[in-house]
Image (cartoon, rainbow, N blue to C red):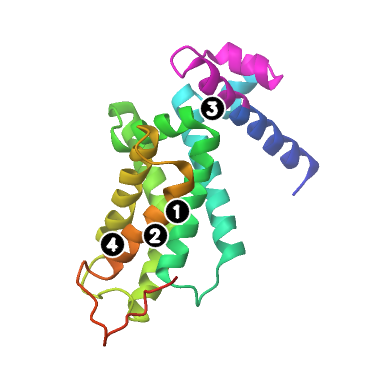
C-alpha cells in the first residue's frame, strides 16, 4: 500500500470514529456533517469526498465492522472449527463492537432490519458481505454433517441471525446482563444445531461443544 493510500485509509477511519463518537454522545439526528468534520480534524469537503451522507457513514462503519469480524474469525478459528464455534466468534465479535458503540448498534439494527427506501441498497450490500463470511462456514458444516444439506444457506443464516437479534434486543432492554450474553447465544445456537430435538443418552451429536 502506497503512502497516499495509507493516508486516505487513516482519514476515512478517523471520520468513521469521529462520527460514531458523536452519534453516541449527541444522537444520530442531532449530529451534523460539520460537527463530524470538526471532530475528525478535517474539512467538510473532505467528508463528502469519502461519504455522501450520514447514512453512507453508517454503511462504511458496518463494512469496517465486517472486516474486524473476518479478522477475528481467521485469528480464532480454522477449517476444523465447528459451526457453533465459528458462529459464536462472529456474533460475539459483533456484540462486543455494539457494546462499545451502543448508538451505532441501534442505527445498525434500524438501517439493516427496517431500512427506508434510500437505505435499502445499503442494507442489501451489507447482507451480501455478511453472506460472504457465513456461507462458506455453513457449507463446510453441511459437508461435515453438522447441518442438514436440504436447507438453503440463506435460511440457515436466518436461524442464527434471528437468535442474535433476540439476544441483543434483550441486552438493550436490560433483560440480560452483558456477562450472560455468550452463554445465552451458545445455548440458543446449540438448540438450533440440535434441531430442537431431545438428545438421548445413547446418542451424541457433533455439535456439543462445552
3 or 4: mark nearer the eye: 4
When the figure is inspected, residue 127 is found, relative to residue 150, above or below; the finding is above
Q: Where residue 29 appears, x then y in whole percent?
A: 43, 15
Question: Image quarter for residue 87?
Answer: bottom left
SS at badge 4: helix
Q: Earlier in the sequence, mark 3 or mark 2?
A: 3
Gap in angstroms between the C-alphas marked 4 and 2 = 16 Å
Query: Residue at horizontal 43%, vertical 41%?
Result: 177
Question: Image quarter for residue 153?
Answer: bottom left
Pointer 3 residue: 51
Gap in angstroms between the C-alphas marked 2 and 1 = 6 Å
Q: Magenta segment range?
A: 18-44
Pointer 4 residue: 156
In terms of depth relative to the viewer, which is nearer, 86 or 172?
Answer: 172
When the figure is inspected, residue 65 is found, relative to residue 35, above or below; the finding is below
Pointer 2 residue: 186
Q: Where residue 159 appears, x then y in whole percent?
A: 27, 57
Gap in angstroms between the C-alphas marked 3 and 4 = 33 Å
Question: Image quarter for residue 169?
Answer: top left
Query: Residue at horizontal 30%, vertical 31%?
Result: 115
Q: Earlier in the sequence, mark 3 or mark 4?
A: 3
Q: Where residue 144 appears, x then y in whole percent?
A: 37, 81
Q: Mark 2 near mark 1, Cβ–Cβ under 8 Å?
A: yes
Query: Residue at horizontal 45%, vertical 70%?
Result: 210
Pointer 1 residue: 182
Most distant residue in the right direction: 3
Q: Where residue 16 appears, x then y in whole percent?
A: 59, 30
In terms of depth relative to the viewer, which is nearer, 77 or 111?
Answer: 77
Amino acid at each position: 500500500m502506497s503512502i497516499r493510500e495509507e493516508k486516505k485509509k487513516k482519514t476515512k477511519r478517523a471520520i468513521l470514529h469521529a462520527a460514531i463518537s458523536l452519534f453516541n454522545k449527541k444522537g444520530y439526528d442531532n449530529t451534523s456533517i460539520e460537527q463530524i468534520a470538526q471532530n475528525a480534524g478535517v474539512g467538510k469537503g473532505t467528508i463528502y469526498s469519502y461519504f455522501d451522507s450520514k447514512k453512507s457513514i453508517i454503511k462504511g462503519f458496518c463494512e469496517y465492522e465486517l472486516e474486524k469480524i473476518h479478522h477475528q474469525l481467521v485469528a480464532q478459528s480454522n477449517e476444523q472449527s465447528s459451526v457453533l464455534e465459528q458462529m459464536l466468534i462472529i456474533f460475539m465479535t459483533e456484540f462486543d463492537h455494539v457494546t462499545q458503540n451502543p448508538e451505532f448498534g441501534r442505527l445498525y439494527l434500524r438501517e439493516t432490519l427496517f431500512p427506508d427506501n434510500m437505505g435499502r441498497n445499503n442494507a442489501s450490500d451489507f447482507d451480501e458481505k455478511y453472506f460472504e463470511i457465513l456461507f462458506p462456514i455453513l457449507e463446510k458444516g453441511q459437508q461435515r454433517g453438522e447441518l442438514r444439506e436440504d436447507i438453503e444457506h440463506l435460511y440457515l443464516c436466518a436461524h442464527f441471525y434471528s437468535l442474535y437479534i433476540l439476544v441483543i434486543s434483550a441486552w438493550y432492554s436490560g433483560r440480560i446482563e452483558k456477562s450472560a450474553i455468550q452463554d445465552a447465544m451458545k445455548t440458543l445456537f446449540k438448540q438450533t444445531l440440535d434441531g430442537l430435538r431431545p438428545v438421548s443418552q445413547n446418542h451424541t451429536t457433533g455439535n456439543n461443544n462445552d
